[in-house]
Image (cartoon, rainbow, N blue to C red):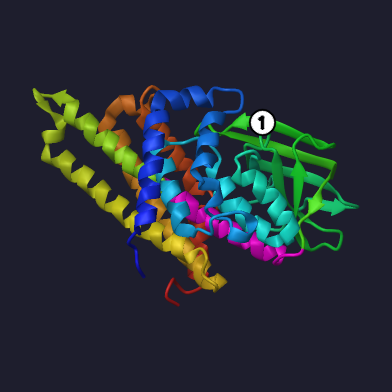
Amino acid sequence: MDFELNDEQRMLADSLNRLLADRYDFEKRRKYMGGETGMEPAIWSAFAEMGLFALPFAEEDGGLGGSGVEVMIVGEAMGLALANEPWAEAMALAPSLLQAASPEQRTNIAEGIIAGEVLTTWAHVEPGMIDRDEGVATAEVGGRLSGTKTVVAFGAEADLLFVTAKDAGGALALYVVEKGAAGLEARPYKTQDGRRAAELTFDGTPAEKLSGGIAAAEAIALAEARGLAAAVAEGLGCMEKAIDLTVEYIKGREQFGRAIGSFQALQHIAAGAVVEKEQVRSMAMYASVMCDDPDPEARDLALSAAKIKMIDASRHVGQMAIQLHGGVGMTMEYAIGHYFKRLTMLEIAYGDRDYHMDRLCAAGGLAA
């Protein structure tokens, strides 16, 4: 398996990192998060102009026909910058869920996403749902949805909602609901890492069923896989930055007349964090390749292994960073605390450690 980036992929990484370095520092991020929508529209437009949202879509849908590797590159850059925008919803989830749609539905929706004009999200998790593969209670009757979804990223801000529900025959299906639709109530709030989320209630809400493509269950499983791979990549970027911030801090923080970064014990701690991060880099690349594997079982096991490694490493790196920063690492005035919070949220995205360990154990391990 080739883990080397080609020239075009390296150019993508360089261009996106330059854009984020110029327009997305820590103070600007705090300003964007405090805005009306919790994100910066100009940044979103810049992403679209770069062609980011076109990358995962097939050429027949107006996209560039990219792979999971390009999404991984974007995820790592977003993690480095701690970008707040719902990029994964546009690049990992929407293209996957639209596989259940007819060619006409897919083209119509993809056009707005690619242009950066339509903000999308996925309403899947429901109150009381412990594992993501549990059955949903939200149901459709006569083209209208009724039910409740929770922890929906940018649920109150999104222009278009992909909703998981049971169809009139009781089968799992996917629907799209437009912002402001009748019977749709959104109760927004902030998550631990400061991002926007909402609880959505559908009460006879008109919806359009996605049909004419692959089965809804297959599209949902694909979205889970690609979303998980994106989360691992973003976690990698967060860990990279957390280590950089920590090394910079201990080089400048003096104790006993010396920079604490000169103490060998602290150097060993930081070096251990780098080793953990590099292992996640390998697993992030592995996940990005395997998320499109034609064998669903092999794909899911590979992604579970990648998620477990990311969780273990993020705890190691995050706790190291807070420890070496000392008390200031716990304040919201320092960036490191925000990176730690984001890593904590990524731990539970698309299934926590117990969920993925159970999946691996049930299969007898990754190589079974």
Residue under label 1, please give it. Answer: 188
> Few, some or many C-alpha atoms within 10 Å of disc 1 (few <14, some 14-19, many ≥20)?
some
What segment carries the magenta color?
A: 212-234
Relative side of 219 to 48, left or right: right
Can residue 131 be seen here?
no
Total marks in image:
1
Is 214 situated above or below 8?
A: below
Location of the C terminus (image quadrant): bottom left
Residue 116, above or below 219: above
Question: What predominant SS class does the magenta segment belong to?
Answer: helix
Identity, as a three-letter code, of the amino acid under mark 1: Pro
Looking at the image, is 110 positioned above or below residue 44?
Answer: below
Residue 27 horizontal side relative to residue 44, left or right: left
Q: Is residue 19 in the magenta section?
A: no
Callout 1: SS: strand
Q: Nearer the viewer, residue 14 or 261?
A: 14
| Residue at the bottom extreme, as displayed | 368
Identify the residue shown where x is 64% and y is 39%.
Answer: 119
Residue 147 in view of the camera: yes
